[in-house]
Amino acid sequence: MPSERKNKILGVVSGKGGVGKSVIAINTAMLLKRQGRNSIIVDCDLSNPSAGLHLGLSYGAIGIQEVLQGKAKAADAIVVQPQSGLRVLPASLKYHPDVGLKNLKNILWGMSGYDYIVVDSPPGITDDVEYILDACDEVVVVTTPDVPSATSAAKVISLCKDKKTPVKGVVVNRISGAAFELTNREIETMAEVPIVANIPEDSLVPESIAARTPIVLYKSSSPASKRLKDFVSVLTSVGEPMQIRDTVFHRLKRFFRKLFRR
Ligand SMILES: Nc1ncnc2c1ncn2[C@@H]1O[C@H](COP(=O)(O)OP(=O)(O)OP(=O)(O)O)[C@@H](O)[C@H]1O
Ligand SMILES: [Mg+2]
């Protein structure tokens, strides 16, 4: 990492899709901006871009795909959300099957003047997600409190270990409090990194998306907004990301042993 690079590039990743990455990435960037930090959200979900939709932006002709192709500069693609002043590097809604994130690191590392670059990732373990992990200084892994999602999250955490990408922690989203949901302890046993946020199921989240306004602006006192604010406080507090010590196989084996004994 060049010593002159001052910004932090934070990836929001997950194993399974639909767990709330985009909601968390967008609201995190928004809250960082509101804290006075110069932040930008970068939509790296080239197949299903949603940052612009969540923020009510009208899509321009240039998106990150054109920047990745070398046809445009990042500065030409960046737009500003009028209500908040948040900067966004959106992905074009036009599908570009031939474009991938191979050049992402060069692009993000060349974006100066930001305190935080928040990357909204597509789900799963793909080449593009590996490029995201290579480009980020740190990631948070989002899961819902169920076995399939947490198992997939553990796999992504294992990939982070292989790639030496620090993991700040796990964000557990859409917690309803039902007895069958995984507990924090169970998720931490699987993930072997700490949980850094517990965000409840909150009907105001889909309502805010329909209103094209991030939940933290739409209803800052809502249950999800409150926990998102706590999360951003944790994110900006000084602390070393956890080192991942164990293999995914051993973590899952221990977890399932405990699960079936309870
Ligand atoms: N805390 C929450 N409470 C209620 N609904 C939520 C919450 N978080 C996310 N959702 C809903 O879950 C859906 C998926 O959220 P989102 O698009 O952020 O997931 P994603 O992980 O980015 O999905 P993808 O993997 O497809 O990119 C949205 O419809 C959103 O309204
Ligand atoms: Mg998404």
Image: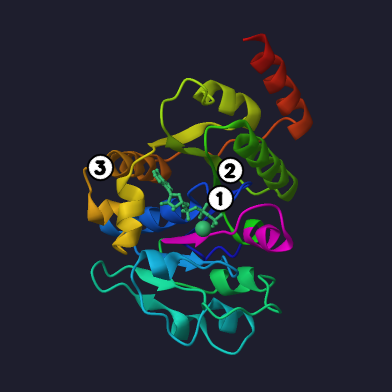
Which of disc 3 and disc 1 is earlier in sequence?
Answer: 1
- Check disc 3 and report its element: helix, strand or loop: loop
On screen, 21 above or below 249?
below
Q: Quick check: 53 left or right of 259?
A: left
Q: Is residue 13 visible?
A: yes
Select label 3 or label 2 by which is in front: 3
Which of disc 2 and disc 1 is earlier in sequence?
Answer: 1
- How far is mark 1 from mark 2, CA to CA? 6 Å
* Dot 2 amino acid type: Val
Question: Which region shows up in magenta?
Answer: 116-132
* Dot 1 amino acid type: Glu
Residue ID at (75%, 23%): 253
On screen, 233 above or below 247?
below
Q: Residues at badges 1 and 2 in contact (C-beta under 8 Å)?
A: yes
Quickly name the residue at label 2.
167
Colouring method of the image: rainbow
